[in-house]
Image (cartoon, rainbow, N blue to C red):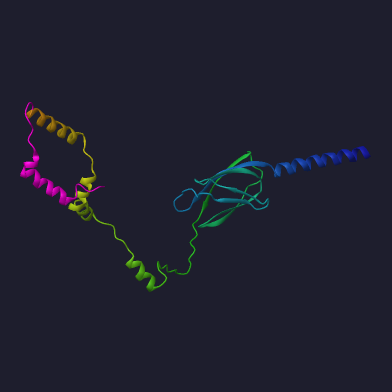
Amino acid sequence: MKKLSFIVILLVAAYSQSFSQKVDRLIQFSGYALTADSLMGVPFAHITIVNRGRIATAGPDGFFSFAAREGDTLYFTCIGFSPVMYVIPAKLESEKFSVIQVMTKDIIWGPTTLIYPWGSRDNFRQAFLDTHLPDDDLQRAKRNMDRERLAELGERLEQDGGEATNLALRNSSVKTYYYGQTPPQNIFNPLAWAEFIRAWKRGDFKKK
């Protein structure tokens, strides 16, 4: 009689364990969280397994996939959407289960807020006086074509290859022209004196 009772207890324990494993079976739960109006993915929606205290997060396209158990209660939440409750069915035929969870946008109305760029009228006046408007194309062209600016740039600008070559050819031609003769002295040339006086007034002989 004792042996029969022990066998019955073992059978009951094995059956209850098998039943509990079947009800609390681990499954792969996956799917998409989509918007109700456009069926677009809800990015980074949170799925909380309420009865277990675990949290999963959907991807940027709303796709989620995590391990859960049959009968778990899921709580879908996301900023700007109304929360949704979902219960995984029990006694599933497969170890994989997929759903498409639709979420509705939730509009939160708050009090009207006025944003001012300046704290007072005095701050606005000072900011207005300090405002620097950018130059337009015409103003930049006039500034770049200023005669004094061009003259200053011309003094600082070195000779390029064409100018240096032209000067060398002129000097060579002068030497060739007076070959075998005494070159003239510009000290008696009034045109050379006039050019010397103009150069003196321009300050060409000042040390830079």
Q: Which residues are magenta?
A: 179-208
Q: Is residue 146 visible?
A: no
The reply to whether residue 136 is visible in this rendering is yes
* Image height of 96 relative to 47, above or below: above
Residue 31: quarter of image: top right
Q: Is residue 110 above or below residue 99?
A: below
Q: Is residue 152 left or right of residue 3?
A: left
Place of residue 29 in the rendered image (x, y in percent of width and height, measured from the top left): 60, 43
Residue name at image x 15 percent, y 33 percent: 166
Q: Residue furthest bottom?
A: 121
Residue 32 point in image, percent of width and height? 53, 46
Q: Position of residue 177 (x, y in %)?
A: 7, 29
Q: Look at the image and say whether residue 32 sits in the magenta stretch.
A: no
Q: Residue at x 6, y 42 (%)?
A: 189
From what the image shows, is residue 196 above or below residue 168? below
Q: Is residue 183 magenta?
A: yes
State the image coordinates of residue 107 (x, y, percent, origin top left): 48, 61
